[in-house]
């Protein structure tokens, strides 16, 4: 007799096992706005509170899965499409996925949202004016972009399309890191209950 094929494990079963549902918290914003700082601190907070959490970082993905891609508009789209797919698979597996990508184009963020059940995509606009990001110049990239050593740099020579209706709009030039983290915690808790 052939063995019975088991039914697939459901999202509800995984949620019982992990103590929470899976979802994507998508951080978008200019370079230097605060995506890495906030998402890394959130990963630590959620991990320490026993959650199944994973930080998907743009820079890391670019050295592996997306290493064949550059920074043209087409390659940026493909980079985010792949990032969205990875995030979706991880969220499906039950993880709270923190995705930190400049992700400058509204449509590609909206496409990822559209591929998920309602309430499972929490868009966090890490919102700081270009002038502040440039002043911070965490990685020295703005200086290079102004000197034309980097082409198609978001905010300088390539557009950034701000979210129209993000779940959270964080003004990292005005609010402290701690205040921003508190707002993200509330948003995550709210969506975990939905
Ligand atoms: P990104 O990942 O968006 O390129 P980073 O997190 O690498 O940005 O850099 C943001 C910089 O801004 C860090 O030096 C951080 O300490 C500083 N910063 C100041 N206030 C905030 C805030 N409220 N939230 C996040 N970062 C902040």
Image (cartoon, helix red, strand yellow):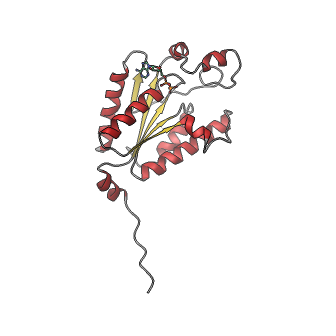
Is 55 or 112 nearer to us in this picture?
55
Residue at point 41%, 49% (across, down): 117
Tell me where residue 169 appears, x and y as whole percent: 41, 26
Up-down relation of residue 92 to residue 185 (above or below): below
Q: How many marks?
A: 0
The quadrant in which the C terminus is found is: top left
Tell me where residue 180 appears, x and y as whole percent: 36, 24
Q: Is residue 185 left or right of residue 79?
A: left
Residue at point 63%, 36% (across, down): 76
Up-down relation of residue 133 to residue 189 (above or below): above
Extreme residue in the bottom direction: 1
| Quarter residue 1 falls in | bottom left
Tell me where residue 53 appears, x and y as whole percent: 39, 43
Q: Is residue 66 left or right of residue 189?
A: right
| Quarter residue 67 falls in | top right
Residue at point 52%, 15% (across, down): 136
Tell me where residue 63 appears, x and y as whole percent: 61, 39
Up-down relation of residue 151 to residue 111 (above or below): above
């Amino acid at each position: 007799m052939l063995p019975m094929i088991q039914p697939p494990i459901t999202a509800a079963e995984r949620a019982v096992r992990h103590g929470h549902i899976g979802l994507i918290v998508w951080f978008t914003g200019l370079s230097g706005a605060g995506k890495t700082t906030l998402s890394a601190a959130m990963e630590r907070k959620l991990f320490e509170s026993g959650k199944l959490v994973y930080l998907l970082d743009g820079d890391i993905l670019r050295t592996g899965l997306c290493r064949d891609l550059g920074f043209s508009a087409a390659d940026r789209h493909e980079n985010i499409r792949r990032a969205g797919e990875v995030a979706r698979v991880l969220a499906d597996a039950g993880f709270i996925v923190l995705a930190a990508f400049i992700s400058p184009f509204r449509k590609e963020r909206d496409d990822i949202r559209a591929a998920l059940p309602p309430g499972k995509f929490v868009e966090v606009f890490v919102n700081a004016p270009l002038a502040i990001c440039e002043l911070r110049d965490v990685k020295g990239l703005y200086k290079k972009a102004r000197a034309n050593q980097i082409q198609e740099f978001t905010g300088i020579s390539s557009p950034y399309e701000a979210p129209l209706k993000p779940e959270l709009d964080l003004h990292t030039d005005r609010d402290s890191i701690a205040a921003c983290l508190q707002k993200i915690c509330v948003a995550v808790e709210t969506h975990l209950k939905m």
